[in-house]
Image: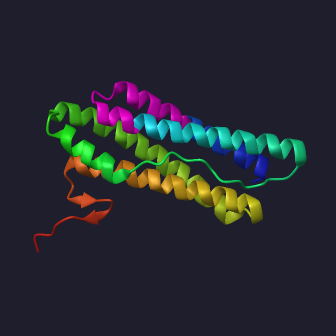
């Protein structure tokens, strides 16, 4: 895949996830969930802006300079503590809606991460550096969304690590 096509595809992925997080923020019935979804939507919008700037740069100069990628600092430990406090007040019905939204978000993040992984493997030089940074960020988003789901479903896992074992 050529760099121009890869950036265009990445923009579409980022817009799709951004819109999903906006939709989820509007649908979640609690402040903590809404704040998380809005923070993730803001991060995805930063990605769209950055990629659109890289596309303009590519068209104007034929070069791709990989600058620092601005990202929202999402403190996952703080978010999980907030979720614990809110979860005590929510009914199972409320958990169900949030779980559905988080499941959609996780699927979108996994698809985006897969795309970035493929770009890292197939690109060279600046293209590879560009998509590696996006891969790292999207993998962190996966961890945050998965931790939220693990908590709400009481799976016994915390950021992919089993919290307890009965054996």
> Where in the figure is residue 89, as x and y percent of width and height?
14, 34
Image quadrant in which you'd find residue 158: bottom left
Image quadrant in which you'd find residue 118: bottom right
> How many marks can you see?
0
- Residue drawn at x 41%, y 36% is 37
The reply to whether residue 29 is in sight is yes
Instruction: State left or right for residue 14 relative to residue 29.
Output: right
Q: Pick out the residue farthest to the bottom.
A: 167
Instruction: State left or right for residue 133 relative to residue 39.
Output: right
Instruction: Give 41 or 1, whichever is nearer the viewer.
Output: 41
The reply to whether residue 17 is in sight is no
- Residue drawn at x 62%, y 60% is 132
Q: In the rendered structure, which segment of residues is drawn in magenta? A: 16-36
Magenta span: predominant SS is helix
Classify the position of the C terminus by image quarter. bottom left
- Residue drawn at x 36%, y 42% is 103
Residue 55 drawn in magenta? no
126 shown above or below 34:
below
6 shown above or below 15:
below
> Where in the figure is residue 143, as x and y percent of width and height?
40, 55
> Where in the figure is residue 119, as x and y percent of width and height?
66, 58
Instruction: State left or right for residue 61 relative to residue 68.
Output: right
> Where in the figure is residue 106, as x and y percent of width and height?
41, 46
Instruction: Give 7 or 129, whichever is nearer the viewer.
Output: 129
101 shown above or below 133:
above
Q: Pick out the residue farthest to the right.
A: 61
Q: Pick out the residue farthest to the left.
A: 166
Residue 19 drawn in magenta? yes
- Residue drawn at x 77%, y 52% is 3
Classify the position of the N terminus by image quarter. bottom right
Instruction: State left or right for residue 75 relative to residue 99.
Output: right
């Amino acid at each position: 895949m050529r760099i121009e096509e890869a950036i265009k595809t990445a923009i579409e992925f980022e817009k799709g996830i951004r819109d999903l997080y906006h939709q989820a923020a509007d649908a979640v019935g609690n402040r903590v969930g809404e704040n998380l979804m809005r923070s993730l939507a803001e991060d995805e919008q930063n990605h769209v802006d950055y990629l659109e700037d890289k596309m303009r740069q590519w068209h104007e100069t034929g070069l791709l300079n990989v600058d620092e990628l601005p990202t929202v600092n999402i403190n996952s430990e703080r978010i999980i503590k907030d979720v614990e406090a809110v979860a005590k007040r929510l009914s199972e019905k409320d958990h169900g809606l949030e779980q559905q939204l988080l499941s959609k978000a996780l699927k979108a993040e996994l698809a985006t991460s897969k795309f970035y992984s493929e770009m890292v493997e197939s690109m060279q030089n600046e293209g590879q550096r560009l998509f590696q940074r996006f891969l790292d960020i999207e993998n962190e988003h996966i961890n945050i969304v998965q931790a939220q789901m693990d908590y709400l479903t009481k799976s016994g896992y915390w950021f992919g690590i089993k919290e307890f074992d009965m054996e």
